[in-house]
Image (cartoon, helix red, strand yellow):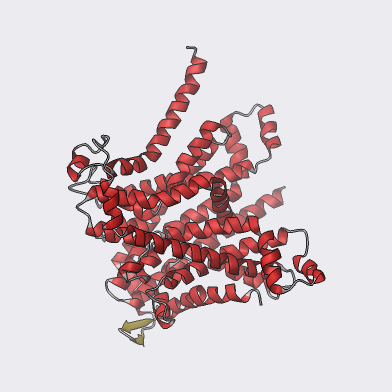
Amino acid sequence: MPIKKVFPLIKVLLWLSLALVMLYPLLWTVLSSMKGSNVEIFDHPFALPKQINWVNYQKAIREGHMGGYFINSLWVTVLSAVLVVMLGVWGGFALSKTRFPFQRFWLALFFIGMILPVQAFLIPLIDLLQTLGIHDSLWALIFPYTAQTLPVAVLLLAAYFRSLPVELEEAAKLDGVRTGRFYFGILLPVAKPAIGTVVVISCLNTWNEFLMSLLFIVDPRLKTLPVGMITFEQAHNTDYPALLAGLALISVPTLLAYALFNKQVIRGVVAGTVK
Amino acid sequence: MFFLPAFLLFVVFVLLPSTQTLIDSFYQFHGKQRAFAGALYYRFALTDPKFHQSLANNVIYIGWTLLFEVAVGLALAVALEKENRLNNFLRVAFFSPSVLSLVVIGLVFGFLFKDGVGVWPGMLNESRALLTISVISGWAYCGFYMVIFLAGLTAIPPEILEAARLDGADAWETFWRIKLPLLKEVIYVALLICFTGGFKAFDLFWVMLPNQDHTSIVSTVLVKEIIKYDNKGYGSTLAVALTSLVLATVVLIMWVTRAWAGVRGEKE
C-alpha cells in the first residue's frame, strides 16, 4: 500500500483507540457489573464476564432502593426545570424591556448571582429551610436549585427577547390580549428556542447535584440518586458487582438524554458558558 | 410585576443567605446561641495549616486542570474541527463523560484505585492523589471544553482561513497566528470556568478521598466544619474566603480581558 494511504489509516486507528480509552471506564463498569462475584472481578479485572448476570441489577434496584432515588431525582429535576422556565420567562421578559427601571443594576445583580459559588449561601440555607418548614423535603432542593439556575435563565431569556424584532407587549396590547393569555399564548411559544436551552442548563445543574443534596436531605426515603449511591456504596461495599450495576444504572438516563438531544445539550452547554 | 417571582426566589434562596454567611463569619456559635467574635476566625484562618494546605491543593488542582481540561480540550477541538462522520463520532465519545455524575465517576475510579482490593492500587496515596484526581477531572471534562472551543472555532469566518491558506500558512502557523487570537473570548470564558470550577470543586474529593487531611480542598474542609465539628462560625469564614477567591478571580480575568482589548484597540 502506498504511504499516502497508510498514514490516514493509522491516524484513524489512533483516534479510535483514544476514543476507546475515553469510553473504557464506562465499558468496564458495565462489563464488571455483569460478573458473578467479587472474585471474578479481582482475578480477571479486564476480562469479559464468563456469564451475564442480570441478578446484580435486580439487587441494585431492590436492595439499593434505586427506584425511590430515581423518582426523587426525577421530581426534583422536572419541578426545578418547570419553575426555572416559568419564572425565568417572566423575569427575562420584564428585564428585556428598555424602560425597565434600574435595568443595568438588575442585570449586574443576576450576573453576580450566576458566578456565586454554592458554598457562598450553603450554610445559612440549612437554617433557612428549617425556618420555612421545608427542610428534609424535596422542596428543600427544588427551591434552592431553581434560585441558583434562575440568574443564567433570566439573563439568557432577556437577551433572547431583546433580540426579537417586534415589541411583543405593544402588539399584545393592540390585540387586547389579557395577561394570562399573553403569557401562555404568546410569550412561552415565542421563547421556545431559548426555553430549550434553559431546560438543558437546569437539568444538567440539578440531576447530578451532590453537595446541597448531601446536606439538606436526611430522610433516607427522600435522597436523590447521587447521595443515594453513596448510601448504597456504604451498605454494599463488599458486593462490587451489585455496586457497579447501580452505578451503571444511574448513568443511563443522562447518557440516553445526551444521545437523544445531542444538539440541544451542546447548545445549552455553550449558551450557559458564553453568556 | 412579572419580574417579582424570579427576583424573590433569588433573593430568598441566594442573596440573603450569602449575606448571612458573611455575617455569621464574625460570630461564634454554641448550639442555638451565638456571640460576636469579631475577626477571630479570620485570624485563626491565617494561621490554620489545614486551611493553607487545602487552599494550596485548590491552586495545584486548578493548575493541573488547566492542562488536562482546558489545553486538552483546545487540542481536541482543533483536531476534530472538520465535520465528518469520524469526527462527529469522536466528539460524542469525548463529550459523553461530562454528562455523568461526578459521584459515579468518583466511586468507579475510587473502586479501581482502592488500596488493598483495587485493580490499580496506590493512585490515591497522599503524594499522588491530587494528580490522579486532576487526570480524572481531565477525563471527565476535556470534552466539555472541546465543545466550547468548537463553538468558537465555527464562529471564525472561513474567508480569513482561506486568506491564510492562500498566503501559504501551514496548519501550525494558522493555529498560533489566526485561530488562537480569534478564540480569545472563548479562552477567557474557559479560563473563567476552570478557575472558578477549581475553587468550587467538591464531589470528586469528597467521594474519593474521604479521610485524607493532606489532600483536602477548601470546600471539603468547609463541609467537614459543618457536619463533623458543627462549627458554623469557622465554616462561614471559609465560605467567605472561597467566595472572595471566586469573585476576585472573575474580576481579575475580566479586568485583564478589558485591559488587553483596550491596548489592542488603541493600536488598531
In this rendering, position of residue A177 left or right of residue B126: right
Q: Residue at x 38, y 64 (%)?
A: A211
Q: Is residue B78 above or below residue A131?
A: above
Q: Position of residue B178 (x, y in %)?
A: 63, 38
The residue furthest right is: A174
Residue B21: image quadrant is bottom left
Is residue B36 something one can see in this rendering? yes
Q: Position of residue A88 (x, y in %)?
A: 60, 67
Q: Residue at x 53, y 48 (%)?
A: A261
In this rendering, position of residue B197 left or right of residue B227: right
Is residue B215 something one can see in this rendering? no
Q: Is residue B133 above or below residue B232?
A: above
Q: Is residue A238 above or below residue B247?
A: above
Q: Which of A30 and A117 lies nearest the eye of the viewer?
A: A30
Count of residue discs: 0
Q: Position of residue B246 (x, y in %)?
A: 47, 63
Q: Which of A80 and A56 lies nearest the eye of the viewer?
A: A56
In this rendering, position of residue A50 left or right of residue B159: left
In this rendering, position of residue B266 left or right of residue A40: right
The residue furthest top is: A1
Q: Residue at x 20, y 44 (%)?
A: A37
Image quadrant in which the N terminus of chain B is located:
bottom right
Q: Position of residue A61 (x, y in %)?
A: 31, 55
Residue A74: image quadrant is bottom left
Residue A174: image quadrant is bottom right
